Image (cartoon, rainbow, N blue to C red):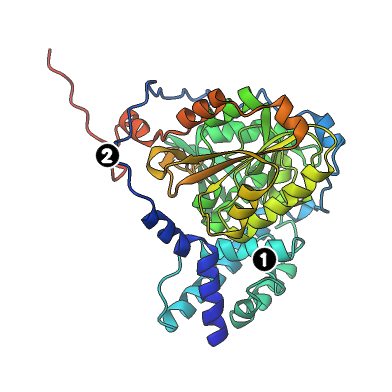
Amino acid sequence: MDDIDAILNSMAAKTGNVSAVKVAESIPASKSALKKRKHVLTASSPGDNSAIWNANVQIELRHIGSSEHKVRPCNLQNVSPAYELHRQKCVLKLKAKLSAAVEQMGLPKLPNSAYETWQFCSKLAVPDGDPLIPHSDSDYAGLRDELEAHRVGQSLLRLAHGGGKKRATIRPNEDHYLVSYGGTSLRLNRTHLDKLQTLFDRHHAEAATQLFPDFLFCLLLRYESLDGGGFQAALNEECFDVLLRHFDCNMECFASPFNSRYGRFCSAFLDTDRVFGSFGSFFDFHPTSGCFEANPPFVPALIAKMASHMTLCLQNATKALSFIVIIPAWEHTEGWQLLKNSPFNKEYLLLSQKHHGYCEGKQQMRPTRYRIASFDTSVFFWQNAMAASKWPVTDAALDDLRLAFKSKQSEERDDLGLKQGGKKVKRVKASS
């Protein structure tokens, strides 16, 4: 059990939550209240999804064609609702065993992101392993053996691919849609359904059109199985517009089909995400030109590997290449130090925790989209010499970005008539 104790402590530390508390305590709280934004939020109409993505902007294929991008082998036949449901059952068993081990040892409860951190670190060690079941060669191999994850994972290989003739269904339910299969239903907002249908129509060349509900169900269940909405948080639309306007930044290195701002992006799961426009893992992506936004999962080991990969890309680039990186201001971590001290770092911007925010990681399932940031945020502008000349980081650009980053949570809740607890506020009509 000593090995498990050490592994659990390591896992908790790798989430960043333990050390992040110390960082927050060392930063004096701001005395000024969050100023009211000048613009008024307006509710989007059912057919208006411009807030969640920009359908008219997409990276030019010449940037991709001239890169060293490679796509790992991906068999879309393995993407089926039955297969994905079985995978989720395996994940739930692992989570239950993990919680039981923690309780048995009398350790503090792990953060909700613990399993996802384990999975991310496993993917760094074994990229070709199962998308959700941590591999025995990962950092937490001892824990995996103790929890008999190998036996659980191997059961996936014995499951018949395809899942029979039954198909997933999509049906309206009040103000949202339900995507259902085998007694399991997943919620999806109308705007995100429209977006995902459009992306599928653009990129589904290897899949039959009538399979859209199946792929949609698998996509929803895959991200639901991780249950780490915090890792999927994204910039708001105004931030992306600023980056596009000042730096021609039109692709994300770490996104999902739900939160991507543009039609092409890199994401964690090539098998479920490819038909919605994903190029797969950023670590298989080697751009030689262009400007890219990177808001990775807040896992220190992953951030450090990202910095190393970006360094290699910039060293090999023969044209203007830039990365705009957004991570927590965790100065104590290796990844932050690599980003701050690199010669490619041309500018640095620090945002106070209370005065900026992000979009919810599970915005596709929620009535609200915005949240206040959990940490101070660091923004790094990495550029080679050609990019620095083509896209200079001006004071005007930094001022625009600061303003765009301000949290929209309060205004959104007021606009929707929500109290702090998320319940509707009963509006009283003014007497005439």
Decide if residue 220 is in sight here. yes
Residue 122's disc is 1
Residue 357's disc is none
Left or right: 305 as drawn, with respect to 101: right
The answer to whether residue 113 is above or below residue 327 is: below
Q: Nearer the viewer, residue 413 or 192?
A: 413
At 49% from the left and 25% from the top, the residue drawn is 46
Decide if residue 112 is in sight here. no
The answer to whether residue 16 is above or below residue 179 is: below
What amino acid type should be assigned to the residue bearing mark 2?
Answer: Lys
The answer to whether residue 181 is above or below residue 88 is: above
Instruction: Determine the secondary structure under disc 1.
Output: helix
Q: Nearer the viewer, residue 9 or 329?
A: 329
Q: Nearer the viewer, mark 2 or mark 1?
A: 1
Instruction: Determine the secondary structure under disc 2.
Output: loop
Where residue 422 sits, quadrant-wise, is top left
Q: Are marks 2 and 1 in contact (CB under 8 Å)?
A: no
Q: Identify the image quadrant of the C terminus.
A: top left
Where residue 54 sits, quadrant-wise, is top right
Q: Pinpoint residue 31: horizontal percent, then vertical percent.
A: 28, 40
Query: Which is more N-terminal, label 1 or label 2?
Result: 1
Task: Say which residue label 2 marks.
Answer: 419
Disc 2/disc 1 C-alpha distance (Å): 40 Å
Left or right: 111 as drawn, with respect to 267: left
Q: Residues within 10 Å of mark 1 (few under 14, many from 20)?
A: many
Q: Pinpoint residue 317: horizontal percent, then vertical percent.
A: 83, 39
At 43% from the left and 83% from the top, the residue drawn is 104
What amino acid type should be assigned to the residue bearing mark 1?
Answer: Ser
Q: Pinpoint residue 177: horizontal percent, then vertical percent.
A: 50, 39
Point out the residue furthest to the top here.
Answer: 432
Left or right: 165 as drawn, with respect to 35: right
